[in-house]
Each structure stands twice: as C-alpha cells, then as structure tokens.
Image (cartoon, helix red, strand yellow):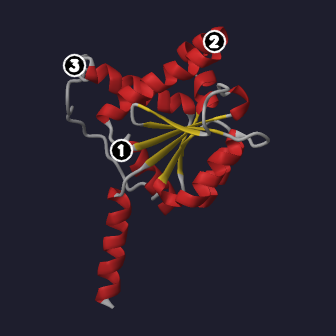
Amino acid sequence: MTTLTVSSAFLSLHEVFMSIHIIIDGYNLIRQSRSLSDVDQINIQRGREALLECLADYGKVRKHRITVVFDGSGAPSFSTPTDRFRGIEIRFSRRGQSADAVIKKMSNRLKEKALVVSSDRDIIEHAVLQGAATISSPEFEKIILNTSENIDGHDTTKGEKGWIPTTKKKGPRRRLPKSARRSRIKIQKL
C-alpha cells in the first residue's frame, strides 16, 4: 500500500517538474497585442517577425520548448510547413487546414505537457479537455514583456516594501481541482 502512495507522489512531483511545451496561436497573439497588431496591419510578414523576435528573447531566459502555429494561407510562398527561428519552432497549417486544427492535434498528442496560448474559446476548451494548461494571449504577452524588462536591467520589484505585518486572519481556502492546480503550476513556470 505504501508503495502505491510513494509512486503516486513521485508521479505528481514528476508532473510538476516536467518540461513545458508552449503552443502559441500565432495570429491570435499578434492581433490581441497592441504593438504587434499595429505592425501586422502594415505588413503581415513583419508582424510575424516581431512576434518571433519577442519569443526568441523570452526563450533565452526561459528554456521552454516553444512552437508558434500560423494559418498557412498567410505563409510566405517559399516557406516549408515547419521552420525554426532562433530556437522557436514555426508551423504553418497546410492548404485546407486551419491553425486551430494543428493546435488541437498538438494538444491531443502532448496532453498535460502542453501549455496553449490563445484567446480562442474553442481551442481553449479543447486543450483543457486534453489536460493541457491554457493562458490567454494578453496574459502571455504581459509575461513576455515582464521577462524582457527584467533582462534589460529594469527591476520591477524596486517599489515593493516586502512583508507588512497584519492582524487580518486568513482562513482555509477552497482547494482548486487538480487540473486547475497543474495549470497554475505551469503558468507560474513562465
């Protein structure tokens, strides 16, 4: 009986520390972002390049595997369905296939190892059913921007005063479901 308990505890610890594969709905993230959407409206190729530059900088700090999926209809004619840019995997959907279908297929395969970045409700619901963690495009952009600010030497914690003593009581909270706790752990790793 204790063997089962120890092995199940080991498995849950292993799940916490396993690597994350971030799957990004490329155009969704670009069009949800103020700065990237401005570039995208001028030139779609430059919008993609700006996103990939941001992700490559983020990838230097956080060593997660990152795949960006774009609809193939906007792909450069000379591009292959899969490409790489400074460690970031780029996938374009094939003719007749949407980026949403590619993301769903990847979340089917990766299950709980995946973190899907999208604000598309259909993609989010599908990913959650597969056991993947999800985060909205604007939330992920904030994380990327905070990470790049810390790289550039801007300390975002300077204004914090630390712990402030209080007499306010904190009672026990309702425990989140296991899938929500796993998602929270993955998002905290970002």
179 displayed left or right of 173 = right
- Quadrant position of residue 88: top left
Q: Earlier in the sequence, mark 2 or mark 3?
A: 2
In the image, 161 versus 75, the foreground residue is 75
Mark carried by residue 43: 2
Mark nearer the viewer, 2 or 3: 2
Q: Residues within 10 Å of mark 1 (few under 14, many from 20)?
A: few
Q: CA distance from mark 2 to mark 3?
A: 38 Å
Which residue is situated farthest in the front direction here? 78
Q: Residues within 10 Å of mark 3 (few under 14, many from 20)?
A: few
Q: Which residue is mark 3?
A: 158
| Residue at point 32%, 19% (across, down) | 149
Mark carried by residue 189: 1
In the image, 47 versus 8, the foreground residue is 47
Q: Amino acid at mark 2?
A: Asn
Residue 156 visible somewhere in the drawing = no
- What percent of the width, then of the height, locates residue 38? 60, 10
Q: Is residue 160 above or below residue 118?
A: above
Asked if the residue under mark 3 is in contact with the one under mark 2, i.e. CB atoms within 8 Å, the reply is no
